[in-house]
């Protein structure tokens, strides 16, 4: 999941500004290292305003995951990978699109909910579950195209459209981790290249074949 980032030119209300600040700071520093004071400074709000909107930092974490899910859903719904008429081409176009938006600094293209889930999965079940809803919800948007492509090409096997949709997110999130570890976005793009090859192999498809 990615890519909405940086605050919009016309900044919204205090709650929205805090959610935008959380989105950017947590991706850059991590959840534990991001303090309420830093969030307030970045959002240009008082600490009183923070606690008016959020009972605690963890409450903000849950809301930030939900805000991320909402904004990324809109972003991906408008993306060009939906345009191909053929279902498999849409799946491959999705992978290509995910690779294309891996640009800039790691904190600009990496996933807020993936970052938080890795860090707090054992310490904050509420945030973990909100992150899970975002990640699994996004994966589910791929299932219909995968299932249509599988049916149209007569692909059999001991896997489901849902499992392959989840695997795409495994590769993407893992690519973000490698990009962070190696301080090199190319490592994440490389992972997407391998995902493209894997899907083509799974569907017995190559460029010489009609879509």
Image (cartoon, rainbow, N blue to C red):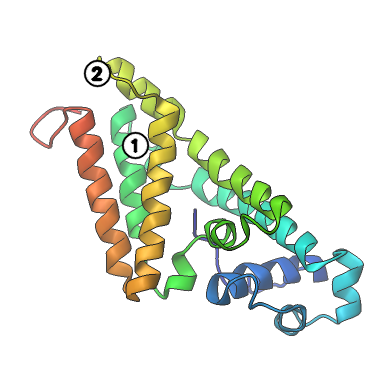
Q: Quadrant of the C terminus?
A: top left
Q: Residues within 10 Å of mark 1 (few under 14, many from 20)?
A: many
- From the viewer's perspective, tell me whether residue 120 is left or right of residue 196: right
Q: What residue is pinned by disc 2?
A: 153
Q: Residues within 10 Å of mark 2 (few under 14, many from 20)?
A: few
| Residue drawn 52% across the image and 43% down it | 77
SS for dot 1: helix
- From the viewer's perspective, tell me whether residue 28 is left or right of residue 43: left
SS for dot 2: loop
The one of 129 and 10 positioned closer to us in this rendering: 129
| Residue drawn 63% across the image and 78% down it | 33
Pinpoint residue 89: horizontal percent, then vertical percent.
28, 34
Q: Which mark is residue 61?
A: none
Q: What residue is pinned by disc 1?
A: 91
The one of 31 and 9 positioned closer to us in this rendering: 31
| Residue drawn 48% across the image and 70% down it | 108
The image quadrant of residue 65 is bottom right
Pinpoint residue 29: horizontal percent, then vertical percent.
56, 77
Mark-to-mark CA distance, 2 and 1: 14 Å
The image quadrant of residue 68 is bottom right
The image quadrant of residue 142 is top left
Pinpoint residue 26: horizontal percent, then vertical percent.
60, 71
């Amino acid at each position: 999941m990615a890519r909405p980032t940086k605050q919009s030119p016309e900044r919204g209300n205090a709650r929205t500004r805090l959610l935008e600040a959380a989105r950017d700071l947590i991706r850059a520093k991590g959840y534990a290292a991001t303090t309420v004071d830093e969030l307030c400074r970045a959002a240009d709000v008082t600490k009183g305003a923070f606690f008016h909107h959020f009972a605690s930092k963890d409450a903000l974490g849950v809301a930030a995951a939900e805000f991320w899910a909402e904004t990324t859903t809109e972003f991906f719904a408008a993306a060009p990978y939906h345009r191909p008429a053929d279902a498999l081409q849409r799946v491959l176009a999705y992978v290509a699109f995910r690779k294309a938006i891996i640009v800039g600094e790691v904190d600009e293209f990496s996933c807020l909910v993936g970052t938080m889930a890795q860090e707090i999965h054992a310490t904050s079940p509420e945030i973990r579950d909100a992150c899970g809803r975002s990640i699994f919800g996004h994966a589910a948007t791929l299932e219909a195209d995968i299932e249509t492509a599988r049916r149209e090409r007569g692909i059999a096997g001991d896997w489901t459209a849902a499992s392959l949709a989840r695997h795409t997110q495994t590769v993407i999130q893992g690519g973000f981790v490698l990009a962070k570890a190696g301080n090199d976005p190319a490592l994440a793009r490389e992972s997407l290249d391998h995902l493209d090859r894997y899907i083509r192999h799974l569907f017995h498809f190559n460029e010489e074949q009609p879509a």
